[in-house]
Image (cartoon, coloured by chain):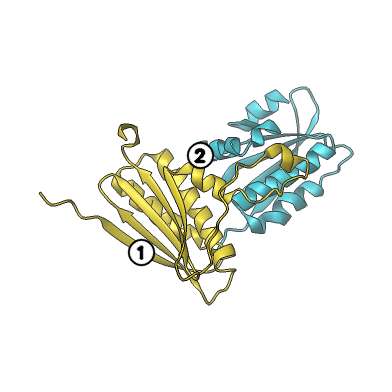
Amino acid sequence: MESETKTHVDQIKSPTGYPVAVLRYEGDIASTSKEAVLGSYEALPRDITKLILLDFTKVDYINSSGIALIIQLLIQAAHSGQTVCIYGLSAHFTKVFTMVGITKYARLFPNQAEALAAL
Amino acid sequence: MSKPKSTTVEVRLPTKMGYEKVAMSTASAVAKLMGFPEDRVEDLKTAVAEACINAIEHGNRLNEKLSVGVVLRADTDTLEVKVIDDGKGITAQPVKPDIDRKMHGDEDARGMGMFLIQALVDEAEWVTGSDGNSSYVRLVIKLNKETE
């Protein structure tokens, strides 16, 4: 019944020329999204991936289990010295992410351009 | 003058992850009919989703022989949603998640459902059935919150 999460990975450059990995999620982010969220992150080459963007533009539904997966991603990124920024959340989920404190460890932006400009 | 009657909508969900979306859609439709603004509708949808997930996963322990009842009651300016399962209920109060503790591995990354429920609606109450085999969470959102 849950819409399967799809993750598309892009490699782009920041305005200052640094490589940035963009994880573009599509569908629902729930307890069944472990492979899509953590698996796709863990597949990134850790030695050269320092800047990561999480794109939620095409995500309609996130529940607390999905948020927990994002937190687990942030934990691993912090241990690896990686910077993670998030963009594309709806106004509602921007509020929810702020309520649970994720903004303390990952900045939220409305779109990719503003997220890249901040890196 | 007689008090306007309330309107009741009932849904029965299978105990399967994902079916909380049916309850979300129903709650959304009723809230919109009542005139709730979009942001409150979204708050309610997330709260209902979390309540149903808790009922499916914890109350009914993913037992597909059981079902989750969702009863919506719309009064003039109040929408009440009850999510009913066959579990023994909970006694612990929702705890605000501590993101620092989660990030340091001192707290489970999961477990934010009850906190979100309480934070997103005007009233949230967890009730254990008297027989110990049926429990519900009651969620309320109010149209004219500022005048309360």
Q: Position of residue A75 (x, y in %)?
A: 77, 42
Figure check: A107 above or below A39 = above
Q: Which mark is residue B10?
A: 1
Q: Position of residue A105 (x, y in %)?
A: 71, 33
Q: Which mark is residue A92?
A: 2
Say which chain is cyan.
A
Is residue A74 in sight in this rendering? no
| Element under disc 2 | helix
Figure check: A73 above or below B131 = above
Instruction: Return the chain for callout 1.
Output: B
Residue at the far bottom in the pictured view: B65
Residue at the far right in the pictured view: A47
Structural distance between the alpha carbons of marks 2 and 1: 26 Å
Amino acid type for the residue under numbered disc 2: His
Between A58 and B79, the residue placed more toward the observer is B79
Q: Is residue A10 left or right of residue A100?
A: right
Say which chain is yellow.
B
Residue B12's quadrant in the figure? bottom left
Is residue B34 in sight in this rendering? yes
**Image point (49%, 58%), residue name:** B21
| Element under disc 1 | strand
Crowding around mark 2 (Cα neighbors within 10 Å: few <14, some 14 to 19, many 20+) is some
Amino acid type for the residue under numbered disc 1: Glu
